[in-house]
Amino acid sequence: MPFTEVADRIWVARYDWFDVNVTLVGGARGLLVVDTHASGLAAREVIDDVRRLGVGDVVEIVNTHEHFDHTFGNGEFRTSYGEVPIHAHETAAERTVAAGERIKGLYDAEPDDPHRDEVQATTIVPADRTFSSAMALDLGDRFVELVHPGRGHTGGDLVVRVPDADVLLAGDLVEESAARNAVPGFGEDCYPMEWPLSLDVVLSLTTGSTVVVPGHGAPVDRDFVEDQRNAIGIVAETIRDLAGRGVPVDQALAAADWPYPREELAAAVRRGYEHLPRSQKRLPLI
């Protein structure tokens, strides 16, 4: 079975496309599914796996953020399970359609991509239940907490905490996948200067025994999250130092040592420079 039980009634399936995780949290009312994969077709495979697992029907959906590899299966789950509520942070819900249409445009320019047609055929269904800071979902015999720890990978990141099982589903705030060499996703919508502080909040929700499920890759522990938080913190402080010394943004990548490959950090550096207040930036030296 693709789904593996990582704690009491919490199952994680890891799919080859994007090495993405879909998680089920079981309760007396049914199943909460966290993230729904990258297309309607891919979601149908997930739904088949849920049914083969045989532990209940899906009654709630959560999107950890707006990116298509976590949201494009929403419509297919509703086709299979009815108008189940879809939960997300308010920013993620607001941006889901625009983010999805942008990705469809990128796939449109890649006619040889094997997933092009299924991405293009997917109907984008954004979350319809939103919150700003935190909320709880009642699954009957257990509560699940949704927490927005701050901005990081996107502006609408959330984490899912299952207190009775000591499990935290971190979305793409934490990256383990070997497909990316565990490099966090510093995309065009990231917030590198805030990400370390958001991970401090995530860490405050964990214990030494917590199982942390990233958006991609294998489950990790608190030590892994601490190490990644510190590396992202180095990225943020290096950006702050370079800008404070007047190093131009187009020279910043070459001007310092970084904890991740330079080619992965172009957007992070550009976004970091944009987000710094004027008081922390010096005019470039001539």
Image (tube, rainbow, N blue to C red):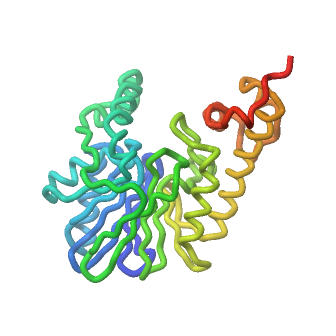
How many marks can you see?
Answer: 0
Residue at (25% x, 43% y) in the render: 125
Does residue 104 lie above or below 19 as drawn?
above
Q: Residue lying farthest right?
A: 286
- Nearest the camera: 239 or 277? 277
Residue at (52% x, 73% y) in the render: 211
Q: Quadrant of residue 119?
A: top left
- Nearest the camera: 185 or 205? 205
Quadrant where the N terminus is found in the figure: bottom left
Residue 189, image x and y in percent?
51, 37
Question: Can residue 176 be seen at all in this image of the molecule?
Answer: no
Does residue 276 lie above or below 282 as drawn?
below
- Nearest the camera: 68 or 238? 238
Question: Can residue 68 be seen at all in this image of the molecule?
Answer: yes
Residue 208, image x and y in percent?
62, 78
Q: Residue lying farthest front?
A: 279
User: In the image, 116: left or right of 148?
Assistant: left
Does residue 58 lie above or below 241 as drawn?
below
Quadrant where the C terminus is found in the figure: top right
Residue at (28% x, 53% y) in the render: 45
Residue 283, image x and y in percent?
78, 24
Q: Quadrant of residue 175?
A: bottom right
Residue 165, image x and y in percent?
44, 80
Residue at (35% x, 24% y) in the render: 108
